[in-house]
Amino acid sequence: VLSDQNAIVELRQLFSLAEHYGYLQWIEFDASVVRGLAYYTGIVFE
């Protein structure tokens, strides 16, 4: 299980990569989206 700090680091890395490759304008963070998963600790792409 990831700690809160690890999750924050992963999100920062994701947004940094998205910015680097020019996709930042199409990314939105929503902590409530898990689409029917009872338990999940990773990033959800929609």
Image (spheres, rainbow, N blue to C red):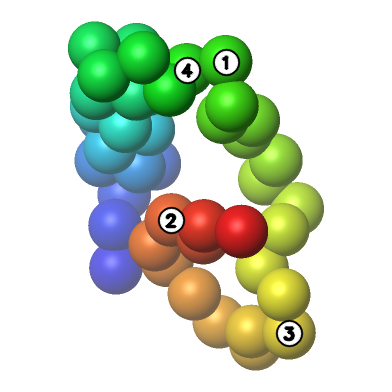
Res. 9 in view: yes
Q: What element carries label 3?
A: loop
Q: Is mark 4 on a helix, strand or loop?
A: helix
- Marks 4 and 1, how far apart at CA: 4 Å
Which of marks 3 and 1 precedes in the sequence? 1
Which of marks 3 and 2 precedes in the sequence? 3
Res. 12 in view: no
**Which residue in the structure is indicated by mark 4?**
24
Residue at position x 29%, y 68% in the image: 1
Query: Which one is nearer the viewer's eye here, 7 or 15?
Result: 15
What mark, if any, has residue 36 been given in the picture? Answer: 3
Mark 1 vs mark 3, foreground winner is: 1
Crowd band around label 1 with a 10 angstrom C-alpha radius: few (<14), some (14–19), many (20+):
few
Which of marks 4 and 3 precedes in the sequence? 4
Q: At label 3, which amino acid type do we have?
A: Gly
**Which residue in the structure is indicated by mark 2?**
43
Task: Name above or below for residue 4 compared with residue 13.
Answer: below
Q: What element carries label 2?
A: loop
Q: How many marks?
A: 4
**Which residue in the structure is indicated by mark 1?**
25
Task: Name above or below for residue 20 compared with residue 3.
Answer: above
